[in-house]
Image: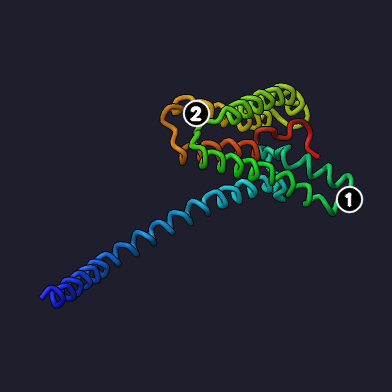
């Protein structure tokens, strides 16, 4: 009797396990799909952010003359340096090199923040404060030149674009310093790099 009974128990257990697997499989697939989607989103988000920063930098070479356009030094100076050494045909190469500064910096910061969980790294704070001080010094030195060669309208527009984003980022970072999540920290870092790429160091004085 024991020999006949044991296979019966085994068969029932096998059927039970099989039924459980059939019941769990849709949920398992859904969870696995959600995890894969989440991982892909986490991978794509820094890439999309970096590409947008690159495009912001390249906007300095847009063939549109606007009185209030900052024409960021971060893009323009490398472009002029490379074209001065290699010729005007390589102007775009210098612009690309300058436009890559912000995306590379953001990817490095995002990678560190995502891995360490440190949402407010000291290196980020020190670098941001230093760049802000240099931006302020640039605005002070370029104010008179811009009024003299262009207009007061451009001078005011450049100073607003150079300083107001930095003040806003600094204020948000200070207020939210204790409640920063990784996602919010990445958004704040993106805004800082976007400011660097677009208008932290605009073209003061006479336009070429």
Q: Residue 31: percent from the left, percent from the top?
A: 34, 59
* Closer to us: 121 or 160: 121
Occupied quadrant, residue 23 = bottom left
Q: Residue 179: percent from the left, percent from the top?
A: 41, 30
Instruction: Say few, some or many: other residues with alpha carbon within 10 Å of mark 2 (under 14 / 14 to 19 / 20 or more).
Output: some
Instruction: Say few, some or many: other residues with alpha carbon within 10 Å of mark 1 (under 14 / 14 to 19 / 20 or more).
Output: few
* Closer to us: 91 or 117: 117
**Residue under label 2:** 173
Residue that appears at 51% across and 42% down: 114
Q: Residue 59: percent from the left, percent from the top?
A: 67, 47
93 w.r.t. 186: above or below: below
Residue that appears at 61% across and 38% down: 193
**Residue under label 1:** 87
Nearer the observer: mark 1 or 2; the answer is 2
Residue that appears at 84% across and 42% down: 81
Badge number at residue 47: none
* Closer to us: 2 or 109: 2
Earlier-in-chain disc, 1 versus 2: 1
Occupied quadrant, residue 79 = top right
Q: Quadrant of the N terminus?
A: bottom left
38 w.r.t. 106: above or below: below
Q: CA distance from mark 1 to mark 2?
A: 43 Å
Does the CB distance between marks 1 and 2 fall below 8 Å?
no
Residue that lies at the very extreme toward the left in this rendered image: 1
Instruction: Indicate the secondary structure of the residue bearing disc 1.
Output: loop
């Amino acid at each position: 009797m024991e020999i006949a009974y044991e296979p019966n128990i085994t068969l029932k257990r096998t059927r039970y396990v099989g039924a459980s697997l059939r019941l769990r499989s849709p949920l398992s697939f859904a969870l696995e799909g959600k995890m894969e989607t989440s991982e892909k989103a986490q991978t794509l988000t820094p890439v999309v952010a970096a590409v947008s920063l690159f495009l912001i930098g390249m906007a300095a070479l847009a063939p549109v003359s606007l009185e209030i356009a900052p024409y960021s030094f971060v893009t323009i100076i490398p472009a002029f340096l490379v074209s001065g050494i290699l010729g005007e045909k390589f102007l775009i190469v210098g612009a690309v090199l300058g436009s890559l500064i912000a995306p590379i910096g953001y990817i490095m910061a995002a990678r560190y923040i995502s891995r360490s969980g440190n949402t407010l790294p000291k290196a980020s704070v020190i670098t941001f404060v230093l760049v802000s001080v240099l931006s302020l010094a640039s605005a002070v030195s370029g104010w008179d030149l811009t009024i003299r060669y262009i207009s007061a309208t451009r001078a005011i527009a450049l100073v607003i674009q150079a300083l107001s984003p930095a003040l806003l980022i600094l204020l948000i970072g200070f207020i939210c310093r204790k409640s920063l999540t990784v996602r919010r920290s990445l958004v704040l870092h993106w805004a800082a790099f976007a400011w660097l790429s677009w208008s932290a160091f605009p073209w003061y004085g006479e336009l070429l």
